[in-house]
């Protein structure tokens, strides 16, 4: 590495090298921290475990010593108790019992713990012979052939009158013998004497001979694992009374190297004994003693492995960082996904339920099979897509559930994955469902793994593409459909780049502009904007698209291929990307040249019609003025003659003629006035003189004026208007003309004994007011209604012949109500009657709760709006 360093410094520093160097520095610090942390943890664990095991060893030794001490103390107590019990029994029986063999045998059987002794001798003082006699009560060993009398001289000198229990042993060290089967236990015989004092003299002595290994119950403490040596010594002389040594495995006896000694003192009667117990570690404790060192070695090994792993990992990280510096920006999203996947993986490791929930929430089927294709696992999506339960599907052959035509191909691909010939495989197939049908799916084998039993497992996914295939098919059909619509559309459809290049166009656009097809159109037109006859229209087109994003019914002139200008109606919108940058314009063009020509012709015709209508109105207005002047003279003079105001007329016929002239003149004057009013309205010279008035008063006046005419025809006129109804803002004279005309027509066309009714419909909630005049006359059909509403239109009937008219009454009503922003409706049925309705807008209906001042302000407001 040191030899290549100059070459690296000579090369240009690649981007991101400083980060790599920084990571190298961090790597060394990380390695040091890992090593120190591992070392500290290992030493801490070693010390803690060492202290714990040491305390455990101490507790074990103390426990073993306590058990041994308790056992020896209990054995000494039993020995003392046995001698006390034996002496007590024979004292109760008396001196004579000692000489009776049968009595001695019977009493010996009830001595407790006699098996702790080798021999029990009863010595008693015979007053007659003035000597001591000795008798055997119990002998445990056949080798004890010494007569009991020989123990009298050996025991009595050691007894004291003031001591009830005397214990003594042979002072020679060499008298340690083996008394049992275990050659490792050596003991010396001791004598325990219990004297009985009577009359100030010692009368009886109970002597027990035993070896301590017998007295201690066969020294079962040898069975305790860990006891190395047990010694009992006379505290006064230091002579050993008992020695027990635990042999090694080879049978030799040696002093252990690693021992723990325990010692204590105890007494049996007057004999003070010193107990020494050596304890050696057993196999379990020896192994446990090595555990801290094993842990220390294991921790150090792990620390070194971890340090080397971090070192290797950081080295590899440095190399990967150097290689991936240029791809950092592109891999950011991938890193985030990997981090998210790692987080999800850790979460799934924490909870099996969460893991299963995530798997089951996937919309695709996730499955696992063995090497033969039998299903071992599927997620819950399996039931949603196939309809089969998971328990029913486990163990089944996956390929048996595919379409028969796909069995061989899919199984071959599967076995190729298992054999390692291919890493992954994806293909389209059909999966059978519970209803017997097959759904289109994408089957993928993506991974081969080995389970805990080293069996091969194949993991894969099944994606339900049934809806996608249907959607793709529907999309293809829709695309074909709309392509056909676009290509066969009567209007031109286009996509144009901002610089004017034609991106796409349908055949109709080429046909409208005079080209054979869209290809020829694109070849000849470089900038579509140059086709506009007026360049300002193109600028306005682009400005509106920029401001609004769309344009509707944009009419302009555009150049045809042969040079003439055609009119088009254009609809377009601007198409932008996600950043708001303009991509292109798309829209449609409709050829409206013929419509524009018709509109121009209609404008010219309307202009001529308006001029002719105005000339007619002016002519009628002038003629009406000219006609009314002589009619006034005719009506006036005929009235004078008819009334014979200047004297009687010679012939009565002249008076009658004068009356006819007067009636005809008045009817003619009415016609002329109607014509004049209509002409003034059409010419715009008619002005409304608006006031606040009552329709009830106006209707009453009209009914009164026409009462004689109604009575002559025996017609009943009913006025249902009431005085509490709201008043109207308008011209009272105009409403009087309208009601008079409607009543006059109703009376005129109603036969005798008929009925004419005036009604009002108004609910007082700000709605329009309806004033209707209904008759029970001859009625009209639809054709007659159309004719009656036309100026000078008259419906032919018997009543029309008997009641002549001008045919201007309904026309005048319609014109007058329109001046009040209202409407006029006529409903009729032949043979039943007619209903004529004037509809007064709500704005002209004064509410009853308003004051006169408010109503006056409304009148002034309407007058101002009219002006």
Image (tube, rainbow, N blue to C red):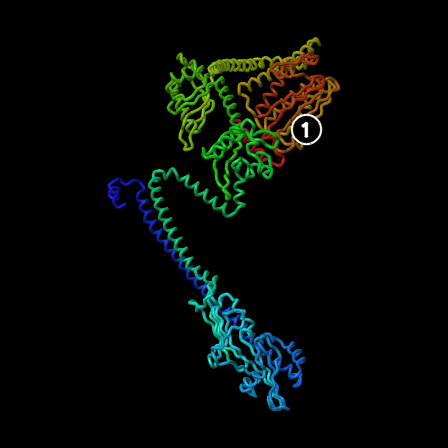
Question: In terms of image quadrants, where is residue 834?
Answer: top right
Q: Tag 1, which secondary structure?
A: loop
Q: Nearer the viewer, residue 611 or 417?
A: 417
Question: In terms of image quadrants, where is residue 400?
Answer: top right
Q: Position of residue 793 (x, y in %)?
A: 62, 14
Which corner quadrant holds the N terminus?
A: top left
Q: Is residue 145 above or below residue 473?
A: below
Q: Is residue 526 visible?
A: yes
Q: Position of residue 267 (x, y in %)?
A: 52, 79
Question: Would you call the spot at circle 1 few (<14 residues within 10 Å), some (14-19), or many (20 or more)?
Answer: some
Residue at horizontal 56 percent and vertical 20 percent from the top:
681
**Seen in the image, is 259 located left or right of residue 89?**
left
Q: Is residue 670 above or below residue 243?
A: above
Residue at horizontal 33 percent and vertical 50 percent from the top:
28
In the displayed image of the protein, which residue is found farthest to the right?
753
Q: Is residue 696 above or below residue 527?
A: below
Q: How many marks?
A: 1
Q: Is residue 70 visible?
A: no
Q: Position of residue 860 (x, y in %)?
A: 55, 31
Q: Nearer the viewer, residue 502 or 693?
A: 502
Q: Is residue 310 above or below residue 112?
A: above
User: Which residue has dot 1 on it?
Assistant: 721
Q: Nearer the viewer, residue 355 or 50?
A: 50
Q: Nearer the viewer, residue 125 or 558?
A: 125
Q: Position of residue 390 (x, y in %)?
A: 58, 38
């Amino acid at each position: 590495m040191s030899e290549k360093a100059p070459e690296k410094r000579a090369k240009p520093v690649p981007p991101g090298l400083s980060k790599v160097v920084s990571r190298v520095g961090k790597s060394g610090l990380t390695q040091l921290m890992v090593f120190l942390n591992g070392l500290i943890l290992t030493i801490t664990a070693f010390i803690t475990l060492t202290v714990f095991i040491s305390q455990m060893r101490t507790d074990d030794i103390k426990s073993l010593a306590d058990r041994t001490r308790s056992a020896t103390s209990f054995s000494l107590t039993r020995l003392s108790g046995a001698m006390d019990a034996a002496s007590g029994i024979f004292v109760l029986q008396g001196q004579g019992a000692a000489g009776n063999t049968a009595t001695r045998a019977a009493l010996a059987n009830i001595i407790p713990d006699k098996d702790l002794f080798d021999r029990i001798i009863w010595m008693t003082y015979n007053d007659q012979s003035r000597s001591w006699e000795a008798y055997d009560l119990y002998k445990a060993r056949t080798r004890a052939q010494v007569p009991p009398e020989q123990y009298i001289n050996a025991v009595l000198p050691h007894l004291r009158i003031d001591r009830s229990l005397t214990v003594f042993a042979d002072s020679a060290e060499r008298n340690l013998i083996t008394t049992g089967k275990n050659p490792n236990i050596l003991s010396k015989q001791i004598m325990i004497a219990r004297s009985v004092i009577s009359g100030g003299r010692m009368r009886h002595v109970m002597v027990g001979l035993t070896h301590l290994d017998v007295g201690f119950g066969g020294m079962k403490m040898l069975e305790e694992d860990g006891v190395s040596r047990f010694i009992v010594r006379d505290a006064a002389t230091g002579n050993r009374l008992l020695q027990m040594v635990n042999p090694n495995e080879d049978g030799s006896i040696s002093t252990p190297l690693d021992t723990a000694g325990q010692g204590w003192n105890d007494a049996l009667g007057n004999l003070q004994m010193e107990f020494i117990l050596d304890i050696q570690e057993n196999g379990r404790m020896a192994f446990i003693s090595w555990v801290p060192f094993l842990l220390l070695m294991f921790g150090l090994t792990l620390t070194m492995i971890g340090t080397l792993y971090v070192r290797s990992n950081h080295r590899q990280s440095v190399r990967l960082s150097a290689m991936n510096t240029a791809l950092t920006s592109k891999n950011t999203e991938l890193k985030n996904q990997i981090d998210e996947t790692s987080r999800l993986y850790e979460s799934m490791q924490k909870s099996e339920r969460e893991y299963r929930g995530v798997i089951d929430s996937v919309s695709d089927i996730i499955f696992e099979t063995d090497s033969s294709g039998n299903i071992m696992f599927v997620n819950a999506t399996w039931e949603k897509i196939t309809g089969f339960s998971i328990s029913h599907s486990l163990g089944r052959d996956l390929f048996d559930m595919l379409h028969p035509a796909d069995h061989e191909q899919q199984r071959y691909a599967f076995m190729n994955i298992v054999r390692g010939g291919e890493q992954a495989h994806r293909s389209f197939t059909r999966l059978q469902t519970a209803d017997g049908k097959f759904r289109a799916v994408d089957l993928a084998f993506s991974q081969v793994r080995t389970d805990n039993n080293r069996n091969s497992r194949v993991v894969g996914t099944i994606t339900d593409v049934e809806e996608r295939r249907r959607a793709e098919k529907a999309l293809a059909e829709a695309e074909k459909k709309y392509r056909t619509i676009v290509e066969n559309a009567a209007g031109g459809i286009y996509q144009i780049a901002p610089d004017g290049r034609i991106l796409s166009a349908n055949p109709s656009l080429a046909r409208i502009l005079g080209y054979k097809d869209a290809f020829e159109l694109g070849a000849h037109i470089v900038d579509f904007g140059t086709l506009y006859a007026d360049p300002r229209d193109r600028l306005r087109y682009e400005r509106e698209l920029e401001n609004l994003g769309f344009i509707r019914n944009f009419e302009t002139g555009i150049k045809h291929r042969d040079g003439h200008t055609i009119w088009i109606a254009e609809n377009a919108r601007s198409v932008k990307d996600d950043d708001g940058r303009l991509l292109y314009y798309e829209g449609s063009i409709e050829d409206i040249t013929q419509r524009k020509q018709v509109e121009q012709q209609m404008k010219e015709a309307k202009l001529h019609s308006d001029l002719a209508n105005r000339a007619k109105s002016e002519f009628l207005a002038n003629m009406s003025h000219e006609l009314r002047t002589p009619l006034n003279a005719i009506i006036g003079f005929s009235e004078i003659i008819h009334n014979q105001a200047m004297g009687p007329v010679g012939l009565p016929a002249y008076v009658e003629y004068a009356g006819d002239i007067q009636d005809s003149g008045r009817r003619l004057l009415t016609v002329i006035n109607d014509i004049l009013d209509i002409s003034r309205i059409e010419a715009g010279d008619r002005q409304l003189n608006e006031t606040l008035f009552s329709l009830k008063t106006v209707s009453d006046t009209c009914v009164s004026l026409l009462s004689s005419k109604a009575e002559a025809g025996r017609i009943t006129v009913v006025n249902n208007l009431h005085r509490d109804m709201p008043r109207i803002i308008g011209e009272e004279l105009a409403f009087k003309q309208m009601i008079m005309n409607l009543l006059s027509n109703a009376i005129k066309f109603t036969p005798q004994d008929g009925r004419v009714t005036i009604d009002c419909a108004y609910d007082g909630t700000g709605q329009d007011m309806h004033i209707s005049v209904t008759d029970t006359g001859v009625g009209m059909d639809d054709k007659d209604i159309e004719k009656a509403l036309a100026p000078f239109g008259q419906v032919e009937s018997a009543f029309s012949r008997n009641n002549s008219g001008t045919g201007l009454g309904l026309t005048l009503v319609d014109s007058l109500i329109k001046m009040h922003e209202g409407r006029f409706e006529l409903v009729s049925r032949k043979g039943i009657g007619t209903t004529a309705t004037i509809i007064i807008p709500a704005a002209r209906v004064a509410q009853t709760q308003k004051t006169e001042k408010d109503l006056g302000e409304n009148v002034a407001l309407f007058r101002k709006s009219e002006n």
